[in-house]
Amino acid sequence: MAALMTETSQEGSAPSLASKPSPWRRVVVKLSGEALMGAHSHGLDMPTLTQIAADLSGAAALGVEVAVVVGGGNFFRGIAGADKGIERARADSIGMLATVMNALALEYAIEKQGKSARALSAVPMPSLCEPFSRQAALHHLGKGRIVVLAGGTGNPFFTTDTGAALRGAELSCDLIMKATQVDGVYSADPKRDPAATRYEQLTHDEAIAKNLAVMDTAAFALARENRIPIIVFSIREPGAICSALQGHGRYSLVSP
Ligand SMILES: Nc1ncnc2c1ncn2[C@@H]1O[C@H](COP(=O)(O)OP(=O)(O)OP(=O)(O)O)[C@@H](O)[C@H]1O
Ligand SMILES: O=c1ccn([C@@H]2O[C@H](COP(=O)(O)O)[C@@H](O)[C@H]2O)c(=O)[nH]1
């Protein structure tokens, strides 16, 4: 396990995780729904799903217990539905269903890699997958299975970022890995502001105070309260999850 915390410097200028006193034992990966659509404008791209499933399997092979909270932005976001006139709580229900679709696809793709996986949903739908419970998740993690968590928190008016922070806390994860479209936390949304500058390291307090919207405030606050560090990195790079776990690659570290 200590091998995960390599003493070598990273390829980029991101901060070293090598100084963390204990190695990563259990992590929660927040996987953007949009990451699953590849070059398409929505939906699932099988080669991309396969690549991410291989990366997650590789992470488990490093000896890390891996839980994945999957987003739904490739299919539906509640806020977008509300903008079109759907009552927000109802729109969020549709959004949560989107995350279940992604979780089922990801569970399948991981199993195709020869790695055992279990999808657990915060919105019970037992004919499709197991309902989420802390006990069930810990049981599967203990068996070495990759746990794919669907439905976010199970409640409207939240996002899967908050779901990841919540599951990170209740499953005693020692790291939240935000696998997204950008390679770190910026001073502003880099997709909208080309002058935005990238942080190598910052605190939860700074992320909240400066309203850095790569994750929502509730997620940053929950992680801060439970003293869980977050790394933000681009999932577009093949093997990005394994690299980040080994302290390589480009990421921003958010820590207490
Ligand atoms: N300060 C910032 N630093 C970095 N990215 C930011 C910042 N502010 C906004 N963003 C945007 O946040 C996005 C990531 O969060 P977003 O919530 O959109 O996606 P997600 O939660 O990863 O996944 P999903 O596709 O499932 O909704 C980035 O792609 C980036 O454009
Ligand atoms: O706890 C939650 C998590 C998610 N939702 C709804 O699902 C969509 C998709 O999730 P993303 O985090 O945006 O990928 C989200 O927009 C919400 O509508 C939810 O209601 N509760």
Image (tube, helix red, strand yellow):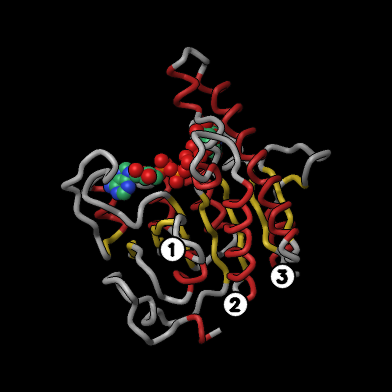
Q: Is residue 37 above or below residue 222?
A: above
| Quarter of the view holding residue 109 | bottom right
* C-alpha span from label 3 to label 2: 11 Å
- In the rendered structure, which amino acid carries the disc numbered 1? Ile
- On the rendering, which quadrant does ligand 1 occupy? top left
**Ligand 1: does it lie within 8 Å of the C-beta at label 2?**
no
Q: What residue is rendered at 43% in x and 18% in y?
A: 83
**Which numbered disc covers residue 228?**
1
Coordinates of residue 76 in the picture (x, y in percent) = 54, 30
Badge 3 crowding class, 10 Å Cα cut-off, few under 14, some 14 to 19, many 20 or more, is: some
- In the rendered structure, which amino acid carries the disc numbered 3? Gly
**Ligand 1: does it lie within 8 Å of the C-beta at label 3?**
no
Q: Residue furthest top?
A: 85
Coordinates of residue 170 in the picture (x, y in percent) = 58, 57
Is residue 192 toward the left or the right of residue 131 in the image? left
Query: Mark 3 near mark 1, Cβ–Cβ under 8 Å?
Result: no
Coordinates of residue 131 in the picture (x, y in percent) = 74, 45
**Pointer 2 residue:** 62
Q: What residue is rendered at 73% in x and 38% in y?
A: 124
User: Which of label 3 and label 1 is nearer to you?
Assistant: 3
Q: Secondary structure at mark 3?
A: loop
Q: Is residue 4 above or below residue 76?
A: below
Say whether disc 3 or disc 1 marks the residue closer to the N-terminus.
3
Q: Is residue 128 above or below residue 112?
A: above
Q: Residue furthest right?
A: 127
**Which numbered disc covers residue 144?**
3
Q: Secondary structure at mark 1?
A: loop
